[in-house]
């Protein structure tokens, strides 16, 4: 086992957040190391399905000191391309990354943090946990209550339709992952039922521009965590019903239903051989349609007040969600696979339990933990609406670096007394 | 100790004490035990298909409480009964409307929207061959419930639509009707 090595800052995770943090620390000449459990951008290499593309256009992949260099700024990167984008970034900033290093435990005493790993311990004055928001799929308890013949798959384990057993598939969850997977499975000829709860519906493009261009332009992505009414709700918001495709197509409940996906309400339980779905489907769709209309109104107002109407396309509104009556139950004997696209819950097995709240969530104020010198990065709406986006982690990293510099300076002043 | 609440009409929006509402939410965020409520009803057979429930005491916010009076509701069967009251199923419609309407009033108050009218018309379909045991494939309860609101307020139509959708989403009775509930029926009162 290696002896304890010392540095100023340990960054855990070598994805977009860890690399952005590393760049900010390098700029400030702060000694640090980036510990990565796999290889750079590990999740993008090993935990994404084959056809996945980013939800955001390529130009919206800015990182501190880096931007998209390819020839398709309006396209959407595949997971492999994201990994290459981040690899090039790592090289350009000479990130001091150590790959294949798993963190086991963080112990904080007297202003120092000991990070135990499978490669020996590190002692640091600060630790930034940049392990991402999408590595630990959340599977609801009802999963343990379904018949034993059913195979369970999460978006992390899903690769392509050929991997699944023949027969019916139940996809639970209709945010980006669930809707995209249901769409792909049904296009490959499988019988797909999609259980739909709360969802956020948006068109891929509006008035000729990508929806993310709009949200970036009107400043929605920059909304700060200390400005929103209900931060808890904003942080739990499901991912947008979008797909990145070369033809920039829309993906919503109406389109998948047209392709043969049977829609159902939220999965609420099992009774005998039947999966039961909530009767709230219509209200969920009404809410999503209303919120979509409200955002598009906001975009039109912005366009009008900024004199953009002449340059932009016509304001064609999406039709309200159309579906035949949703299923209230389905026979689980005809389902051979359940895809649990039910979101993610970041896990911190290396942290003291008292740093988590009663629901196991990290307690932090915009990424700053109550223990001085501990930080998080890359979590949903951590400091901004775009915090967990490839393009959004940079400003958060800059903020955290600034706080961290203050902490280290205070730490030194304190130790000199 | 049982606390009897005397309802007071405040001059706050829509008669909803918003300060109390927000205060309660804040307290329950701090202490989840305060959110544990228990409602109860007593029911007594009258004759034939008629019975009446009385509702008085309830538990919540860490204490026993009672309504200002014991409320009484009688129900009967539409064809076999003697007109003691509407059917139990119709009480379900009343419960749903009352629950969503309360949500509209509080939701509007929380957003500072003054309501001038909230009315709703409810209808529900039921194929009684289910309850009569004529066809085991027919469900006993409602096959579909429709609620049509007429809400007038100093707000844009789509704000009102959002108010209705949100009140529906957060309605306890809507949840009980749309998702399964564990119901244990026994014979304990011997």
Image (cartoon, rainbow, N blue to C red):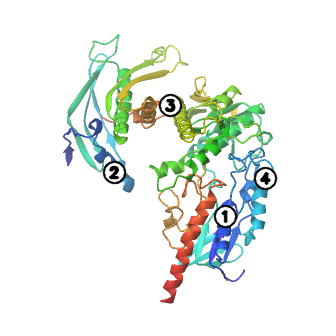
Q: CA distance from mark 4 to mark 1?
A: 18 Å
For mark 4, name the chain.
Answer: A
Residue B9, image x and y in percent?
A: 21, 38
Q: Is residue A213 visible?
A: yes
Q: CA distance from mark 2 to mark 3?
A: 29 Å
Label 3, on which residue?
Answer: A283
- Pick whichever, B153 or B76, lies toward us: B153
| Residue A20 - label | 1
| Residue A81 - label | 4
For mark 3, name the chain.
Answer: A
Q: Are marks 2 and 4 on the same chain?
A: no
Residue A397, image x and y in percent?
A: 61, 64
Label 2, on which residue?
Answer: B34
Q: CA distance from mark 2 to mark 1?
A: 43 Å
Q: Are marks 4 and 1 on the same chain?
A: yes
Q: Quadrant of residue A35?
A: bottom right
For mark 2, name the chain.
Answer: B
Q: Quadrant of the C terminus of chain B?
A: top left
Residue A348, image x and y in percent?
A: 59, 63
Crowd rating for badge 3 (residues with CA inside 10 Å; few <14, some 14–19, many 20+): some
| Residue A74 - label | none
- Pick whichever, A104 or A14, lies toward us: A14
> What is the secondary structure assignment of the residue under circle 3?
helix
Task: Give the side of residue B167 with respect to residue A16, left or right.
Answer: left
Q: Is residue A272 visible?
A: no
Crowd rating for badge 1 (residues with CA inside 10 Å; few <14, some 14–19, many 20+): many
Q: Are marks 2 and 3 on the same chain?
A: no
Q: Of callouts 4 and 1, which one flags the residue occurring earlier in the amino acid sequence?
A: 1
Q: CA distance from mark 2 to mark 4?
A: 51 Å
Crowd rating for badge 2 (residues with CA inside 10 Å; few <14, some 14–19, many 20+): some
């Amino acid at each position: 086992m290696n002896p304890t090595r010392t540095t100023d800052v340990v960054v855990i995770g070598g994805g977009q957040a860890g690399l952005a943090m590393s760049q900010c620390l390098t700029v400030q000449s702060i000694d640090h190391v980036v510990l990565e459990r796999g290889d750079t951008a590990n999740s993008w290499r090993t935990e994404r399905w084959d056809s996945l593309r980013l939800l955001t256009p390529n130009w919206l992949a800015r990182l501190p000191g880096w931007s998209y260099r390819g020839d398709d700024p309006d396209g959407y990167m595949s997971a492999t391309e994201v990994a290459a984008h981040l690899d090039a970034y790592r090289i350009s900033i000479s990130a001091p990354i150590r790959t294949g290093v798993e963190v086991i435990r963080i112990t904080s005493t007297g202003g120092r943090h000991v990070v135990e790993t499978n490669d020996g311990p590190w002692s640091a004055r600060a630790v930034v946990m940049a392990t991402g928001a999408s590595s630990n799929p959340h599977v609801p308890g009802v999963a343990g209550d379904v018949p034993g013949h059913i195979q369970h798959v999460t978006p992390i384990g899903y690769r392509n339709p050929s991997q699944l057993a023949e027969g019916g598939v139940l996809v639970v969850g209709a945010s980006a992952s669930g809707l995209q997977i249901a769409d792909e499975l049904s296009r490959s000829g499988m019988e797909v039922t999609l259980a739909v709860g709360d969802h956020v519906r948006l068109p891929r493009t509006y008035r000729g521009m990508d929806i993310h261009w709009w949200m970036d332009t009107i400043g929605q992505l920059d909304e700060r965590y200390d400005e929103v009414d209900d931060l808890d709700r904003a942080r739990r918001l499901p991912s947008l019903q979008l797909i990145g495709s070369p033809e920039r197509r829309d993906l919503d409940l109406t389109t998948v239903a047209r392709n043969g996906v049977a829609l159902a309400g939220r999965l609420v339980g099992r009774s005998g051989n039947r999966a039961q779905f909530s009767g709230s489907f219509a209200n969920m769709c009404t809410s999503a349609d209303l919120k979509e209309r409200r955002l598009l109104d906001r975009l039109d107002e912005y366009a009008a007040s900024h004199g953009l109407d002449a340059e932009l396309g016509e304001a064609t509104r999406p039709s309200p969600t159309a579906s035949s009556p949703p299923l209230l139950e389905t026979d689980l004997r005809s389902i051979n696979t359940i895809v649990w696209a039910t979101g993610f819950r970041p896990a911190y097995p290396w942290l003291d339990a008292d740093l988590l709240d009663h629901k196991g969530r990290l307690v932090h104020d915009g990424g700053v933990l109550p223990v001085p010198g501990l930080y998080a990065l890359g979590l949903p709406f951590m400091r901004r609406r775009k915090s967990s986006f490839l393009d959004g982690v940079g400003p958060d990293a800059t903020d955290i670096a600034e706080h961290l510099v203050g902490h280290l300076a205070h730490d030194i002043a304190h130790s000199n007394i | 100790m049982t606390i009897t609440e005397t309802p007071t009409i405040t001059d706050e929006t829509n008669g909803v004490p918003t300060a109390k509402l927000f205060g309660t939410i804040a307290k329950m965020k701090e202490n989840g035990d305060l959110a544990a409520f228990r409602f109860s009803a007593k029911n007594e057979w009258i004759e034939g298909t008629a019975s009446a429930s009385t509702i008085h005491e309830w538990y919540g916010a860490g204490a026993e409480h009672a309504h200002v009076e014991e409320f009484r509701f009688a129900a009967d069967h539409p064809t076999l009964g003697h007109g003691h009251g509407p059917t139990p199923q119709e009480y379900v419609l009343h419960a749903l409307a009352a629950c969503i309407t309360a949500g509209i009033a509080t939701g509007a108050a929380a957003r500072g929207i003054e309501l001038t009218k909230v009315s709703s018309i409810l209808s529900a379909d039921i194929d009684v061959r289910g309850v009569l045991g004529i066809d085991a494939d027919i469900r006993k309860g409602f096959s579909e419930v429709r609620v049509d609101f007429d809400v007038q307020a100093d707000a844009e139509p789509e704000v009102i639509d959002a108010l209705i959708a949100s009140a529906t989403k957060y309605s306890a009775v809507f949840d009980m009707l749309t998702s399964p509930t564990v119901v244990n029926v026994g014979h304990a009162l011997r």
